[in-house]
Amino acid sequence: MAICAVRGAAPATTLPSQSLYYLLYCAFDSCSFIMSYELGDFPVLVDWKSDFVLLVKAGVPYLIHKIPRPKGSGFWLVAIQVIASFNLLLLIVMAFGYVRYRRKHWWSSCYIWAVGICDFAHRRIPWKGCKMLMLMYSSWCIGVVTFLGNKWKTVYCSSSREQASKPPLPHENTVDHPSYFHYIAALVGFTAAVQHIEFRFHELWRGILVSACCIGVWIVAYTLNEIGPNHFKIRITNHGKPKQFTSFLLLAFFSMSISQPLASLLSSTKKDKQDYSMMSRALGIPDSGLLVQEVSIQSIDPNEPFDKLLMDRRFRQSFVEFADSVHIYVELLQLDKIPVEDHVRRIYMARHIIDTYITPGSTMEVNISHRCRQDIQSTPDMAHPDLFKNALNELIQLMKMLTRCGRHWRRGVSAAVLEMYLLLLLPYLIIC
Amino acid sequence: MVFVLCTLIDSMGSLCSRHRHSPADPEENEQTAEIERRIEQETKAEKHIQKLLLLGAGDSGKSTIFKQIKLLFQSGFDEAELKGYTPVIHANVYHTIKILYDGSKELSQSSEDSSKFIVSDENKEIGEKFSEIGGRLNYPPLTKEIAREIGTLWRDSAIQETYVRGNELQLPDCAQFFMENLQRLSDTDYVPTKEDVLYARVRTTGVVEIQFSSVGENKKSGEVYRLFDVGGQKNERRKWIHLFEGVSAVIFCAAISEYDQTLFEDDNKNRMMETKKLFEWIMKQPCFEKTSFLLFLNKFDLFEKKVLKVPLNACEWFKDYQPVSTGKQEIEHAYEFVKKKFEELYFQSTSPDRVDRVFKIYRTTALDQKLVKKTFKLVDETLRRRNLFEAGLL
């Protein structure tokens, strides 16, 4: 995430609540770090190598591609993210062989799970997806806790024979140190609070894959560590490969952001179907006869307010030449239907609209001014109800002027344009 | 075109096949037959028509040429059509004043010499009002009262200073013309003149076509042309590709006055550089192997005025330009320089096996009807000559 932000891939994260979130995230990490130090878990060695690599990776884009250094809050956000990532890395490193075996509390590594959750939280999962995820996560957590707890007990009992000092039993400490659970609870709370999402659809799968790998490796390393001391071979594996592997994975982990809500992934098939019905409706492709496009336009009074005209289905059909503009109009209408409080869906829709119609070079890019485009792309709040207002005004003005000139009324639809839309539509027909 | 229609039929076949299973669709069959017949007819008729494409970057004057053709070789605009332009012209006025006022505000904050861009207090109120109106969806009708207010604001020295810096603001070229004719535009029984229509600025989207014969609509003896006008902005160019088949000539419009302006769709790019890139791209299209190229160096009227104030080397492409003298001579010199640059570009981007295609450069001002008429006569002659040559008669 940190590096992703450094690369400028997530420049839109400038909400005050978000900076607050990162600050808190950082603070929490530091807290847990200090706590673990006080508990005697401070690592003897810190993996400076991977820290160094991380730093280099954060800095290199600036040096090589000469990306202008973000100023003000932009810079500090990145800096905080980098520091936070450092913390996280440190914590994970601590989870490996550097953790003292003579630990007082078996669950003192609890914060690592918290970090795991925190990382998913970090990627800001929307609430609907969050419930689902929490369910999955808690079951995983419980599994790990029971498994490791049992493991620890056996290992601990065997090692306690050799060692004189006998620390208290795990469950007693749980009562003494509820702060860890507060930590988790707070994180969950913050996740729910911060739902302004930066969407990156294609990164979703990669992100999930890498996080899954990361967690997997961590579990393996941790488990090996727990049972390891008596087996030399395992110990070597533990201290050697997994660590490097994990630090490598961690780099990958940090260099991308999964910000797509899980909900959208879960309903991806539904979305396609929605798209289809929307596409065909917006295009006004009738079930039979494509050439009957010149349907009774005369019956529509062109002097009516334009936004009313656009609501008329036949009018939209006759307007295929402005297909991109009409499409965005329809999609914006749908965006308007989403209640303002539903940030997640609004942002998802907004992201979809930006990707399809606004970004230069996109498939259905509309004819709007640079300033307008710039305003939309650099918006700090994607859920803002007036985000597309200016663009829509510009487009409607344009369409209006073109119709007033009477240039697009006389002719039907040119075959070329029709063909283009058929090509666009074919995939949807196949799906159907 | 044939190709397009074939694809259309294919696609339609796949479309209709979904419904084939339903027993009662004689209507549909009838329709299919009708479509096929129409396509056949069209293909036959199509053979004798020469296809001309108007290409070029945004705001290069393609649509103005298109309108001129309509005026020159077709019936022109009837009154209803002329009246249809009234809201467009009024929108241009509102748009212009908004750009100018917002621009002056911006310049008064950012430029070094900020004081001269500060609008006087009494005009500020008017400015704010029109800035708000300009952002609306529906503009109020241009009444005498509004026209007077806009006129006052336009004459404000800050706005005039901003107008001088108009090249930074995406100001339409029609700004001055409409501002000076405000009184006439606000008449209650105002009907736009031909000139007004030519000046009116609307970004074209999609593809518009017109069929004409250079001898005149009534006499069918002459060569028949079909002219396609397209939108020039980057997002519009993906629609061009469908037109590239079977083109006899491409009329490439390049506004030579745009060398110090930036793109409408991207404020960081110089328009001339974009035109250069686009020209190169079009030259290299495999579809245009035998297509004639007619390069219109357009907006010469603006170029004439600008080149004496803004040196040509403001544009990266013309960096090595050295002004030689002043006045008319200088204009000619600058024009020749630009022309040479385009010629060089043409030969650079044309592979040796294509050198026999026609390439001609014309100096045009799309607003000047006589000049456009003359140019088209020349174009017509060139194309006919080419046709005869291809038929082996010359």
Image: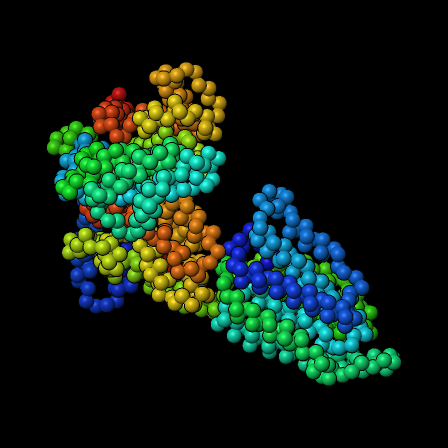
> Which of B182 and A226 lies nearest the eye of the viewer?
B182
Q: Is residue B115 above or below residue B28?
A: above
A39 relative to A354 in the view: left or right: right
Residue at x-position 63% and y-position 54%? A79
- Tell me how the rendering is colored: rainbow
Q: Is residue A341 above or below residue A138?
A: above
Whether residue A245 appears in this view of the structure is no
Residue B391 x, y percent position in the rendering: 26, 27
Whether residue B106 appears in this view of the structure is yes
Residue B6 x, y percent position in the rendering: 28, 48
Quarter residue A343 falls in: bottom left
Residue A60 x, y percent position in the rendering: 64, 47
Residue B193 x, y percent position in the rendering: 18, 35
B210 relative to A386 in the view: left or right: left
Q: Quadrant of the N terminus of chain B?
A: top left
Q: Quadrant of the C terminus of chain B?
A: top left
Residue at x-position 43% and y-position 16%? B324
Residue at x-position 22% and y-position 43%? B145
> Which of A119 and B37 lies nearest the eye of the viewer?
A119
Task: Please identify the residue farthest to the front as the structure is shown.
Answer: B122
A169 relative to B303 in the view: left or right: right
Residue at x-position 83% and y-position 81%? A166
